[in-house]
Image: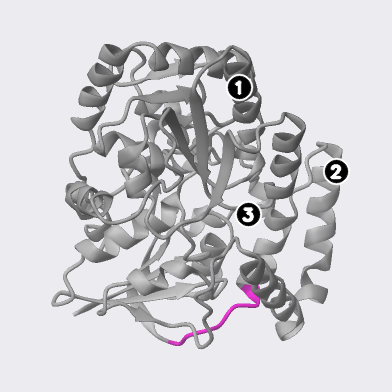
Amino acid sequence: MKRILFVINTLGHAGAEMSLLETLICLNPKEYEISLYVLMGQGEMVKELPAYVRLLNRHYDACPVLGREGRRYLQKNTIRALLSRGTGIRLFPYMLKNFLIMLKGNRILPEKLLWRALSDGGERYDTYYDLAVAFLEGGSAYYVADHVNAKKKAAFVHVDYGKAGYTRYLDKSCYLQYDRIFAVSDEVRESFLKSYPECEEKTEVFHNILNPERIKKKAGETGGFCDHYEGMRILSVGRLTKQKAFEVSAKAMKLLKDSGEDVRWYVLGEGDQRKVLEEEIEKLELTEDFLLLGAVENPYPYMAQADIYVHASLYEGKSIAVQEAQILGKPILVSDCSGNREQVVAGVDGLMCELTPEGVSRGVKILLHDSDLRSTLGDAAGQKNEGNKAELRKLLDIM
């Protein structure tokens, strides 16, 4: 029986984590001994792991990653990693150099600086694996490259590599150590290869594995909206981060309300921009119209009940939230950016807009006032994403 190790940064409710879960479900435990190491040792989705997956972490906290308790646990783990094996002292020149590079580029990303420390300060295991898989960029990619013994190694890239703030120097060129690199879309592959052109032959597209039947079943479970609102509902799902640009959506909502539209906008997700967004929402007088509902265990009843799904972000890899909305047959509006362009064919299975308050509000208005268009786009969206279990062979064939 072959041994496979998967490594991921956290198991919070997010796209890559959902894709990992579906990948694990598709693996046959009679053929493979499957282990998982969660670098941060936290995340609520641990409860959904198949029973045959061996969680290696000695210490694990199932609290929501982006909640207050989750942030405290993250801080504690970061300090522990920095103190472990003298990691903080040893990496000080590396972190200082990268900090200065970020400062020069006027874009400081503390979490990117700390991934190397979290990797080097992580737990160690003597097991030899037939295949080790880093399922995310940053910490998990560094960990598998530097601290895992395996015959073959594969890494997944889920984001636009350059726009997300990664560099060769930050990575210490770790991807050169991998036998195969999987990008979740063509645009993600192209972005990655700008930094790693010598990896072209071993980098291919691996579409997110989703289970449409499972998503539809969960959409029919109890839950969803409970505010008894009778107007049109817009839904967005995503972490409250700068990448997701929810402040633009809030301003778009202001334009919609000022023009008399009977609509309410809901956002599922948590993140470090919550306080900033709450202040912006209050400033715009939208406290009853643009609602931050936080992270929920089952977002699918909300998706099924929403009239329109909007995904207006700065950049994407390949959004699983968009794929899930498509599976549930929702009319979708996305911003014109990397990732989104590959998922939505404008005018066929969704609409595309500029990432400005005016652009987003204009796109929403078109959908609000054309029920036939909503139906046509939703039907076309529902024909996509029939499941990509065949993609799994790309991963297993490495062995």
Residue indicated by mark 1: 252
Q: CA distance from mark 3 to mark 2?
A: 17 Å
Residue 293, image x, y percentages: 54, 49
Per the rendering, the mark at residue 171 is 3
Label 2: which secondary element? helix
Badge 2 density bin: few <14, some 14–19, many ≥20, Cα 10 Å: few
Within 10 Å of disc 3 (Cα), the crowding (few <14, some 14-19, many 20+) is some
Residues rendered magenta in the picture: 120-126
Secondary structure mostly taken by the magenta-highlighted segment of the chain: loop
Mark closest to the chain's N terminus, 1 or 3: 3
Instruction: Name the residue nearer the viewer: 368 or 106.
Output: 368
Q: Label 1 amino acid? A: Ala
Label 1 environment density (alpha carbons within 10 Å; few <14, some 14–19, many ≥20): many
Quadrant where the image shows the C terminus: bottom left
* Amino acid type of the residue that numbered disc 2 sits on in the rendered structure: Leu
Residue 119 at x, y percent in the picture: 61, 70
Upstream in the sequence, badge 2 or badge 1? 2
Q: Is residue 305 left or right of residue 106?
A: left
C-alpha separation, residue under disc 1 versus residue under disc 3: 37 Å
Q: Is residue 46 magenta?
A: no
Label 2, label 1: how far apart the Cα atoms are: 32 Å
Mark nearest the camera among 2 and 1 is 1
Which residue is at 13% across, 77% downward? 30
The residue depicted at 86 percent of the width and 48 percent of the height is: 100
Q: Quadrant of residue 388?
A: top left
Name the mark on residue 238: none
Camera-side residue of 341 and 375: 375
Contact (CB < 8 A) between labels 1 and 3?
no
